[in-house]
Amino acid sequence: MRARDYWKTVTVDRVDFLDQFVAVLRDAAARYCVVGEQPVNAYVDPVVSLDLDLVVALADLRRLDPAFSQRFQVERFSDSLDLSMPGSDLRVQLRTDPRYEVFIERSSPRDILGMSFPVARVEDVLQGKIWAVSEETRRGSKRQKDLADIARLLEAFPHLRDAVPEEIQRRLL
């Protein structure tokens, strides 16, 4: 089974939600990159996730909002837009925190489960995970998952250890 078919099976994406979402971005010439857990999978051995987190340039995101609202179910939160579609368990989360926007310029194409996406560079992925772990309002289980992602990144890229605050490094032991 090819990676893309596997991901579609795991996410039960019977309606090609991912393809439709990417088509909206492509048709609008939106600037974006993948952040969160999937880029960790692009740099180290992958783990299964139903989530695809992206950052879209804020100006492009405002322009795309009507297209998203017409085609997908949209939930609005203080730091994200969450998109879904009946017939798919895939969850697309668009980060609206402006700190992530600079990641777009430094991204490069990488394979994520059988598709090529602009992916945040490994240093930026690590920074995003540090922000997520440090966010005290985030669910504890999510923060633990982010800690595990930091550990996975540091195993593959030990030279990045100095970028991780001591308090987080202690939690990795």
Image (tube, helix red, strand yellow):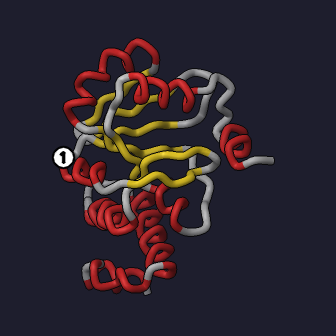
Q: Position of residue 107 (x, y in %)?
A: 36, 54
Q: Tell which of 159 and 172 is nearer to you.
A: 159
Q: Secondary structure at mark 1?
A: helix
Q: Is residue 17 left or right of residue 137?
A: right
Residue 15 coordinates in the image, percent (x, y): 64, 22
Q: Nearer the viewer, residue 124 or 31?
A: 31
Quadrant location of the C terminus?
Answer: bottom left
Q: Residue at x 38, y 24 (%)?
A: 74
Name, please, the residue furthest toward the right. Answer: 1
Q: Splitting the image into 4 quarters, where does residue 31 fall?
A: top left
Quarter where residue 140 is shown: bottom left
Residue 77 occupies quadrant: top left
Residue appearing at x 46%, y 76% in the figure: 151
Going by the numbered disc 1, the residue's amino acid type is Pro
State the residue in front, 96 or 59: 59
Q: How many marks overall?
A: 1
Mark 1 sits on what residue? 98
Q: Relative to 88, is 95 above or below?
A: below
Residue at the spot 59% in from the left edge and 34% down from the top edge: 89
Q: Is residue 138 above or below residue 157?
A: above
For disc 1, the neighbor class at 10 Å (few under 14, some 14 to 19, many from 20) is: few
Residue at (42% x, 45% y) in the render: 53
> Farthest residue toward the top?
70
Residue 110 placed where, x, y %? 51, 54
Asked if 145 appears above or below 139 in the picture, the reply is below
